[in-house]
Image (cartoon, rainbow, N blue to C red):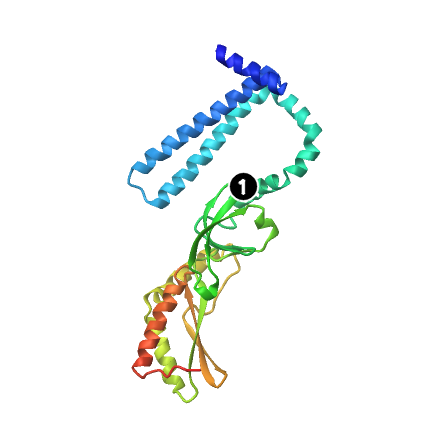
Amino acid sequence: MIELNIIVNMLREMTGINNKYIILVIISIMIFMVIKFINKIVNKLYKIKDHSSKEKFKFTQRCNLIANIIIIFTIFIIWENHLNNIVTIISFISAGATIALREVILNLVAGIYIKAAKPFVVEDRIEVGSTKGDVVLISSMSFKVLEVKERVNGEQSSGIIINVPNSAVFSNHLKNYTTAFKYIWSEMNVGINLEADINKSKKILYTIVNKNEIIKSIPKKMDKAIEEASSNYRIYYNNLKPIIYTEYVDNHIEFTIRFLVHPKKERMVIDSLWIEIIKEAQKGNIELYKK
């Protein structure tokens, strides 16, 4: 107790702040550290048990939220009798503070919006501004995105985590690839020679696409997803099955294969389709166009 008084007096001499406020600050810091320490221990104990990484992540997020609520509530009770004085002081510096803390306040408000409206959640693939990737964490000030490359590069993960301020959702267009359902329309082009048998080639391509296990399973899943999403979004499709369009391009026939796929599996599916197409070309069943 004597040492605490010495520390308090030293801080008063250095800052000129009243002793009672210094003591309250010290108590607040101690409460913050104790609750964070307990939160850390609880998380470690949970992770020792056999849980999936997803369950561990969700548990950690819930614990952090509860710990923060307890900290705010406890500190509010401690400072309750002194809030009027603090508000009076803040009122003198509010204009300058508002300008200085504009981005902080905006990020906090945007964080509340993200939590309440849920324009995206963890694991969604989104694009905001020039950033595109999978959401791996959402906090009160920012959200973290595991970057994916451009569509021409198969949208594969670059392994880079980008920290995006929450306020970005107010100042940029936000694309969510999995808001209503988990699938997007993908397209790939296959060129064949002008002299080739169009009907035969198209039939072979349909067989290849429809045999793909991932593509084959999607229409049934999509029906259910659209039905669930239709209560919130005016979304409908007349056809969910793969379709192949034919076009004449630069002295050859070009087929555009259009199919539904999960954005995270798109490159794997395209790779699988091309392998089967090349095999058919090697057998002489498809005459692929050569420039």
Seen in the picture, residue 99 relative to 263 is either above or below; the reply is: above
Q: Quadrant of residue 21?
A: top right
Seen in the picture, residue 232 relative to 201 is either above or below; the reply is: above
Q: How many labels does the image show?
A: 1
Residue type beneath disc 1: Met
Seen in the picture, residue 256 relative to 260 is either above or below; the reply is: below
Q: Quadrant of residue 18?
A: top right
Q: What residue is rendered at 49% in x and 28% in y? A: 71
What quarter of the picture does the C terminus occupy?
A: bottom left
Q: Is residue 122 left or right of residue 84?
A: left
Q: Where is residue 249 in the image (x, y as percent from the top left)?
A: 50, 82
Seen in the picture, residue 4 relative to 29 is either above or below; the reply is: above
Q: Is residue 280 left or right of residue 171?
A: left
Q: In this view, does 143 lie to the left or right of 98?
A: left
Q: What residue is rendered at 44% in x and 30% in y? A: 36
Which residue is the site of mark 1?
141
Residue closer to the observer: 197 or 104 = 104
Q: Where is residue 110 in the image (x, y as percent from the top left)?
A: 57, 44
- Looking at the image, the residue that sits furthest to the bottom is 195
SS for tag 1?
Answer: loop
Q: Where is residue 93 in the image (x, y as percent from the top left)?
A: 69, 30
